[in-house]
Image (cartoon, rainbow, N blue to C red):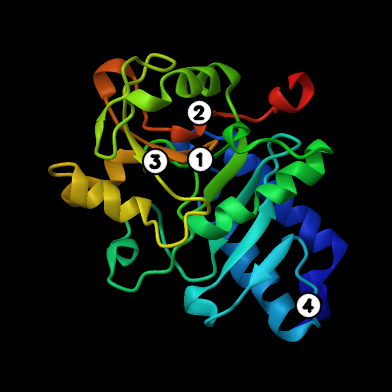
């Protein structure tokens, strides 16, 4: 592997390209494969060949091999936002591999990665302050699955805590729109998302979702004794791009006010 691959200049160029892609609209991303190139060309080779030099990733976990591994990467947007990204080529929420019988569970390590958020926020936050999100095809700029991890929008957190007992263990309307977008909600009785597969809960629990997974977005919001799973759908009439990432607050206001 050429030494230049891991040079500071090469890493800076990759991150600058990543920033440009994120700033572009989803349909006009500068390079929709930037995330994949960072993972595949830098972080994984660093773990495998360069004595655990995983930069620019914060963590590379190849337990079970590259086809089942993931990385944790600091997102260029915000101080506290991180991403969990498969080390296998998985395009996004629409990828059939996510619904396979023995598909890796990327949500459980994404929840563990909240400790990177705490480190950047310089304080530990309660479960209800942290959320995870995957956007629809229309709501994303990158064609490699990535789970956003960051603080929850304060008003959404207040609403969920206030209405927690009304949220059922099956998909039902959240009860109100959020930022003008409608979500279905489901309560999850789990401490760590181990054995919980939100992609399969969406595909199996909402009629017709399996055939059109790319038009859906998912968010998992921590609660004192579990989680709330939110599912939204692309709706051109209401300009809803299916970006569950909107449930997250990349300025992490809760870290400053709680």
Quote the CA–CA distance across marks 4 and 3.
Answer: 32 Å
- Residue shown at 45% from the left, 53% from the top: 143
Residue positioned 75% across, 28% down in the render? 255
Which mark lies nearer to you, 2 or 1? 1
Mark pair 3, 2: CA separation = 10 Å
Q: Quadrant of the C terminus?
A: top right
For marks 3 and 1, give the CA distance: 20 Å
What's the distance in space between the residues labelled 2 and 4, CA to CA?
Answer: 34 Å
80 horizontally vs 193: left or right? right
Most foreground residue, 25 or 186? 186
**Considering the numbered disc 1 on the image, is that residue within a helix, a strand or a loop?**
loop
Give the mark toward the camera: 1 or 4: 1
Residue at the spot 71% in from the left edge and 34% down from the top edge: 78
The x, y position of residue 186, in whole percent, is: 32, 37
Q: Nearer the viewer, residue 183 or 211?
A: 183
In the structure shown, which secondary structural element does the residue marked by tag 4 occupy?
loop
Looking at marks 2 and 4 on the same chain, the residue that comes earlier in the sequence is marked by 4
Judge whether residue 144 can be spotted in this image: no
Work out whether mark 3 precedes mark 1 in sequence or the reverse, and give the earlier one: 3
Q: Earlier in the sequence, mark 2 or mark 1?
A: 1
Q: Is residue 110 above or below residue 164?
A: below
Write down the residue under mark 1: 225
Up the image or down, 203 lies above or below 185; here it is below
Residue 245's spot in the image, x, y percent?
A: 50, 34
Q: Earlier in the sequence, mark 3 or mark 2?
A: 3
Question: What residue sits right under mark 3 in the picture?
Answer: 218
Q: Are marks 2 and 4 in contact (CB under 8 Å)?
A: no
Classify 10 Å Cα crowding around label 2: few (below 14), some (14-19), many (20 and above).
many
Label for residue 247?
Answer: 2
């Amino acid at each position: 592997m050429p030494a230049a691959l891991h040079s500071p200049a090469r890493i800076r160029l990759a991150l600058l390209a990543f920033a440009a892609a994120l700033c572009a609209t989803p349909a006009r991303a500068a390079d929709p494969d930037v995330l994949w190139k960072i993972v595949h060309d830098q972080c994984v080779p660093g773990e495998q060949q360069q004595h655990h030099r995983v930069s620019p990733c914060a963590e590379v976990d190849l337990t079970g091999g590259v086809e089942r591994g993931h990385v944790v990467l600091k997102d260029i947007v915000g101080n506290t936002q991180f991403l969990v990204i498969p080390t296998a080529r998985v395009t996004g929420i629409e990828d059939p591999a996510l619904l396979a019988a023995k598909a890796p569970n990327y949500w459980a390590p994404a929840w563990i990665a909240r400790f990177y958020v705490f480190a950047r926020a310089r304080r530990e936050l309660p479960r209800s302050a942290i959320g995870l999100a995957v956007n629809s095809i229309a709501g994303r700029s990158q064609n490699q699955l990535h789970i956003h991890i960051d603080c929850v929008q304060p008003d959404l957190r207040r609403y969920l805590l206030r209405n927690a007992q009304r949220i059922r263990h099956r998909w039902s309307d959240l009860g109100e729109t959020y930022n003008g977008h409608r979500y279905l909600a489901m309560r999850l009785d789990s401490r760590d998302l181990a054995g919980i597969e939100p992609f399969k809960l969406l595909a199996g629990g909402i009629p017709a979702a399996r055939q059109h997974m790319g038009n859906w977005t998912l968010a998992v919001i921590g609660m004192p004794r579990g989680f709330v799973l939110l599912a939204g759908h692309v709706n051109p009439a209401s300009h809803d791009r299916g970006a569950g990432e909107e449930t997250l607050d990349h300025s992490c206001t809760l870290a400053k006010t709680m």
